[in-house]
Amino acid sequence: MRVLPSLIAFGLAMVAAVGLTGCTTTVDLDPAEAANDPLCAEVTSNLPGMVSGQARRWTDAQATGAWGDPAKVLLTCGVEPPGPTTLPCQDVAGVDWIIDDSDAPRFRVTTFGRTPAVEIYLDTTADENGDGVSSRDVLDALSPIVSVLPVDGQCLDRGEATPAP
């Protein structure tokens, strides 16, 4: 009977998958205040398995995502939408991002003009293998997913984030 070899092969594949996932620890994060917003569920349920060459990892907080081991990219949905700022603002795939580079080569980027807001921490530092994440790759991968969030403002000047009239 052909079913038995297929079931055995499937069982072995599942054991291998469980063994591989057991090697990576869960990333400990805090949920944002509005993490229970249904729109955050829509965002996080569509997060990709890879971002800038980093594999996705499990997190222990609602509406979050993490990639890399150690984590190089952390995403939190449901953060307080930012107000006007003098920080630079950049459009990526129709999503405005405020860029805080005060801790470079670690960056915090936050959606502007979207509610709920999404915040991403990324570490562009190369690891012992010379691997780092590209902020452009990260935003290129995540902006289309975040673009489902309703727009309630936009950056008027790419030099700073100011609400649309």
Image: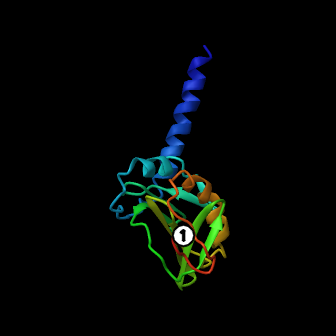
State the residue at coordinates (67%, 65%).
137
Give the residue furthest to the front: 165
Q: Percent x, y for residue 1?
A: 60, 13
Q: Position of residue 103 (x, y in %)?
A: 51, 85
Judge left or right: residue 34 versus residue 93: left
Residue ID for mark 1: 72
Residue 115 in the image: state x and y as whole percent.
45, 58
Could you say where residue 142 lies in the image, as x and y percent from the top left?
A: 59, 58
Residue 156: in sight, yes or no?
A: yes
Task: Tell me if residue 55 comes above or below residue 132 in the rendering.
Answer: above
Question: In this view of the protein, which residue sits in the foreground, 116 or 113?
Answer: 113
Q: Is residue 32 left or right of residue 125?
A: left
Residue 70, above or below 48:
below
Nearest to the observer: residue 15 or residue 122: 122
Residue type for callout 1: Lys
Between 12 and 143, the residue placed more toward the observer is 143
